[in-house]
Image: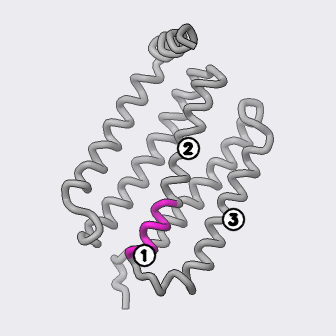
């Protein structure tokens, strides 16, 4: 029997589904800046997550909580990678520095912090999965990512960086 404070590994799959649905909505709202098929790709990714939840209830229960966690965590990391990839797409391909900076502050950084918060909470409950050093590393990396993204996406630094890379190519 689970206690009310215990979090199941499938929570991370639901968090990943929420990320994909939010990305679908945001890319639909910013339709002139993203490819037309992008919202539909994210909706399909969310449906795949729902399918994973349905399958994991029956089939992955055999493997135990450790395997269920890593599969759900991997799905969440794919969602976070897509959030970060859209930020890079705005900077590198579209050269929309202002929108990329807003995207970083309004979508990327909060998404990473929320996910790291829940992973940290889960790791406190399941100390066998994560050593304490890794817990501190997760929090430190989320903080460093937020501060470095705001510095990197300042328009002057980004223009110099991509101008220098363009000359090399």
Could you tell me how far apart the alpha carbons at marks 2 and 1 are, in whole angstroms? Answer: 24 Å
Q: Is residue 33 above or below residue 10?
A: above
Marked residue nearer the N-terminal end (2 or 3): 3
Q: Residue at x 55, y 8 (%)?
A: 167
Residue 90 is covered by the magenta coloring:
no
Find disc 3 in the rendering and name its residue. 47
Give the magenta-colored segment's residue range: 66-74
Q: Residues within 10 Å of mark 1 (few under 14, many from 20)?
A: few
Taking the spot 65% from the left edge, 55% from the top edge, the residue there is: 21
Q: CA distance from mark 2 to mark 3?
A: 17 Å
Q: Which residue is mark 1?
A: 8
Using the image, determine if residue 122 lies above or below residue 104.
Answer: below
Q: Which residue is mark 2?
A: 83
Quadrant where the N terminus sits is bottom left
C-alpha span from label 1 to label 3:
20 Å
Return the x and y of residue 112 as percentages of the image width and height: 43, 47
Q: Residues within 10 Å of mark 3 (few under 14, many from 20)?
A: some
Q: Which of 111 and 37 lies nearest the eye of the viewer?
A: 37
* Mark earlier in primary sequence (2, 1): 1
What residue lies at 23% left-to-right and 51% top-to-bottom? 136
The residue at the far front in this view is: 169
């Amino acid at each position: 029997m689970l206690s009310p404070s215990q979090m199941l590994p499938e929570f991370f799959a639901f968090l990943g589904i929420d990320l994909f649905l939010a990305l679908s909505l945001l890319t639909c709202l910013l339709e002139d800046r993203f490819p037309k098929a992008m919202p539909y790709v994210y909706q399909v990714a969310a449906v795949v997550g729902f399918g994973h939840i349905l399958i994991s209830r029956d089939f992955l229960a055999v493997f135990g909580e450790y395997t269920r966690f890593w599969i759900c965590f991997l799905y969440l990391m794919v969602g976070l990678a897509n959030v970060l990839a859209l930020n890079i797409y705005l900077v590198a391909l579209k050269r929309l520095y202002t929108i990329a900076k807003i995207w970083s502050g309004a979508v990327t950084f909060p998404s990473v912090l929320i996910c790291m918060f829940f992973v940290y909470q889960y790791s406190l409950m399941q100390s066998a999965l994560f050593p304490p050093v890794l817990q501190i590393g997760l929090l430190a990396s989320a903080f460093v990512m937020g501060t470095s993204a705001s510095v990197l996406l300042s328009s002057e630094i980004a223009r110099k960086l991509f101008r220098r890379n363009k000359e090399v190519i």
